[in-house]
């Protein structure tokens, strides 16, 4: 078997594999056997027709093509293992390039490889992590939010005032033309919380049930919808109902309604949770700054498009999951943004490139520092995951597969590498 190797650039290589006529002969016979099992020939059981009769029935090239497929199946893994210097990305692209009776058989395989990474400094970078702190005002603000959640409501015949909830029908117009998405029935608003645009809720103060009001307001110049930003809009509202809201007092009873013993314990828990949330954000920020610095000091070979596209697809899947998790439809989300899935993917490409570079750095550091995870760690993680899918045979079969094992190993190793990098670089 003769193999020629050619560098195609952009992290791709082409291998030309030639089997001599003598080497190819056994694969032809295997191909003939496979074809004879599928072709009905009068007077012979499936798989028992002699070669010459089979050749006359279906043509020699059909047999050769079947033999070539067998040859590729039997030799491709060995060819790749002996000639690929790094991990392969995606599936090999295989094409038969020479195939004729009594001649050598040749096929070419194009492999996309992980790009070369030349690391710069990745230790002692002195990335400062800000210490997380929680102020009393933040705790009080969250207590107000908890009170809002536990507020009781009663229908009011009085004029709407600060803190009341008003249900209304609403129409929004620019130059007397209704704006898209600006018409709604039964829209709820709590006065004092600046919904829709700043100042809107103040226009509702003094309204009663069945009152109709018309007024104009200017959209802020930094409004998220650029078609409305900085424009004067006309609003027409009809009040359908006014609810007076009563917020619970901040007391021991209030704390007990959350299953806690005292008001002091409630405040302590809130502070603890806020601190944990802030600490997590500071850790994420310092980790991102560390990885950015390592990326800026490293050199990367040509990153394969397939790798970037795959990462962008993963990011879109994550985005879709998050949107659905919030109770919305991804199609409606795209409509709101006025973008297609393809346009979102283009928007994600720069971050996809960055995420690929982070993965390459983590892999390279792991290799250089010989960071790995034990079989025990991998199997414990898999066992924990299996417990979550008890009774789901499809998922259990997938989780027990080799591909999922490799995914867990890579994931755990990556986390261990990042923790090591933080030990070396982040100053708290």
Image: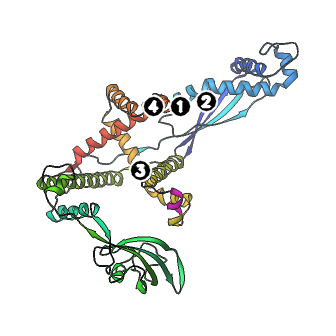
Q: Nearer the viewer, residue 242 or 389?
A: 242
Q: Is residue 345 magenta?
A: no
> Which residue is denoted by mark 4 in the rendering?
399
> Number of numbered discs present?
4
- In the rendering, at what x and y percent does residue 29 appear? 74, 17
Q: Nearer the viewer, mark 2 or mark 4?
A: 4
- From the viewer's perspective, is residue 273 above or below residue 337? above
State left or right for residue 72 relative to residue 180. Answer: right
The residue depicted at 65 percent of the width and 27 percent of the height is 72
- In the rendering, at what x and y percent does residue 171 appear? 49, 79
Discs 2, 3 touching: Cβ within 8 Å: no
Q: Earlier in the sequence, mark 2 or mark 3?
A: 2
Question: Which span of residues is magenta-colored?
Answer: 326-334
Query: The residue tagged with tag 1: helix, strand or loop?
Result: helix
Q: Nearer the viewer, mark 1 or mark 3?
A: 3
Q: Earlier in the sequence, mark 1 or mark 4?
A: 1
Q: Earlier in the sequence, mark 2 or mark 4?
A: 2
> Are there few (<14), some (14-19), or many (20+) residues within 10 Å of tag 2?
some
> Which residue is denoted by mark 2 in the rendering?
3
């Amino acid at each position: 078997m003769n193999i020629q190797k050619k560098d195609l650039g952009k992290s791709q290589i082409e291998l030309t594999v030639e089997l001599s006529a003598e080497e190819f002969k056994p694969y032809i016979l295997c191909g003939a056997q496979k074809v004879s099992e599928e072709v009905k020939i009068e007077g012979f059981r499936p798989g028992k027709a002699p070669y010459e009769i089979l050749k006359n029935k279906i043509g020699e090239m059909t047999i050769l093509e079947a033999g070539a497929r067998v040859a590729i199946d039997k030799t491709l893994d060995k060819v790749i293992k002996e000639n690929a210097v790094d991990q392969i990305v995606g599936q090999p692209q295989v094409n038969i390039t020479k195939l004729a009776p009594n001649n050598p058989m040749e096929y070419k395989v194009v492999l996309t490889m992980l790009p070369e990474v030349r690391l710069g400094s990745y230790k002692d970078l002195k990335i400062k992590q800000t210490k997380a702190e929680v102020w009393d005002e933040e705790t009080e603000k969250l207590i107000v939010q908890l009170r809002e959640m536990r507020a009781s409501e009663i229908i009011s015949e009085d004029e709407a005032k600060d803190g009341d909830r008003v249900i209304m029908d609403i129409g929004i117009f620019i130059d007397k033309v209704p704006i898209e998405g600006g018409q709604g029935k039964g829209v709820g608003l709590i006065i004092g919380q600046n919904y829709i645009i700043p100042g809107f809720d103040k226009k509702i103060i003094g309204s009663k049930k069945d009152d109709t009001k018309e007024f104009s307001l200017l959209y802020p110049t930094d409004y998220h919808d650029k078609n409305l930003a900085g424009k004067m809009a006309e609003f027409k509202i009809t009040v359908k109902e006014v609810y007076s809201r009563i917020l619970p007092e901040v007391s021991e009873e209030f704390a007990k309604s959350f299953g806690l013993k005292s008001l002091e314990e409630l405040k302590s828990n809130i502070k603890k949770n806020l601190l944990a949330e802030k600490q997590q954000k500071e850790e994420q920020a310092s980790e991102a700054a560390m990885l950015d610095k390592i990326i800026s000091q490293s050199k990367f070979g040509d990153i394969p498009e397939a790798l970037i596209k795959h990462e962008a697809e993963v990011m879109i899947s994550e985005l879709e999951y998050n949107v659905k998790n919030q109770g919305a439809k991804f199609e409606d989300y795209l409509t709101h943004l006025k973008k297609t899935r393809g346009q979102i993917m283009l928007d994600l490409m720069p971050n996809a490139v960055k995420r690929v570079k982070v993965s390459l750095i983590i892999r390279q550091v792991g290799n250089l520092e010989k960071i790995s995870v034990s079989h025990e760690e991998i199997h414990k993680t898999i066992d924990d995951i299996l417990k979550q899918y008890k009774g789901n045979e499809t998922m259990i079969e997938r989780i027990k597969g080799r591909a999922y094992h490799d995914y867990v190993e890579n994931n755990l190793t990556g986390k261990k590498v990042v923790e090591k990098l933080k030990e070396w670089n982040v100053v708290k």
